[in-house]
Amino acid sequence: KNQVEQSPQSLIILEGKNCTLQCNYTVSPFSNLRWYKQDTGRGPVSLTIMTFSENTKSNGRYTATLDADTKQSSLHITASQLSDSASYICVVSSTGAGSYQLTFGKGTKLSVIP
Amino acid sequence: DVKVTQSSRYLVKRTGEKVFLECVQDMDHENMFWYRQDPGLGLRLIYFSYDVKMKEKGDIPEGYSVSREKKERFSLILESASTNQTSMYLCASSSSTVSNYGYTFGSGTRLTVV
């Protein structure tokens, strides 16, 4: 069964500090991996998307990494801001036999405090 | 930018009512999806559609139906709303079933059934 596990479940950090969120997956066949940011009460917004051949992708202060061998991804946030407080969801896409499937992690809830 | 618009941010309905949730996308995407999101469970796929008048069941279709009469519009229908359908409902669209390019969410509808 395809699964995406995220850790930690929640995280509190001080404004200005860095943090790293983890995503481990068992999805096959692998197509791509996305990180989404979801503010409370809003829909998820895409931060990055990585295919099998990509190891790192940045979007401003957000940097995602992908190790397709170990099936792990991380999202690193640099110099955190209060507006980074949100849930971060890891989503892995799989294709096979003509079907289409996304597997969602349950998210990491990040709280940035002054 | 792709825009996925959900008609209501908040909705309160009574048990037994028929409820329509509307979703419109403006980028001519072939694929549209309905998810529900509950604390601790993450996003779960209710129904999706690859084309006009085409629909397929997702992981939790029971108690729901959908309609796609036009390419840009995908409606989720709760035939007889129940309290266990209180949830955040998210619509999404994408332009490709293979690369998942442009997979974009709407802002969500928070439905409360009383």
Image (cartoon, coloured by chain):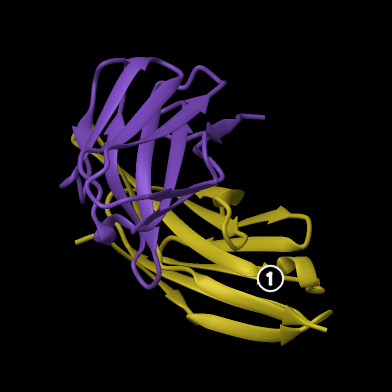
Chain colours: A yellow, B purple
Residue A52 in sight: no
Nearest to the observer: residue A44 or residue A7: A44
Q: Position of residue B29 (x, y in %)?
A: 47, 22
Nearest to the observer: residue B44 or residue A70: B44
Q: Is residue B114 left or right of residue A75?
A: left
Q: Is residue A7 left or right of residue A28?
A: right
Q: Is residue B64 left or right of residue A103?
A: left
Is residue A73 shown above or below B103?
A: below
Q: Kindly identify the amino acid type of the residue bearing the numbered disc 1.
A: Ser
- Residue at 66% across / 78% down in the picture? A111
Within 10 Å of disc 1 (Cα), the crowding (few <14, some 14-19, many 20+) is: many
Nearest to the observer: residue A75 or residue B112: B112
Q: Chain of mark 1?
A: A
Q: Is residue A107 left or right of residue B84?
A: right
Q: Position of residue B72 (x, y in %)?
A: 46, 19
- Residue at 73% across / 79% down in the picture? A112
- Residue at 71% across / 85% down in the picture? A13
Residue under numbered circle 1:
A85
- Residue at 36% across / 29% down in the picture? B75
- Quarter of the figure with the N terminus of chain A: bottom left
Q: Position of residue A114 (x, y in %)?
A: 83, 84
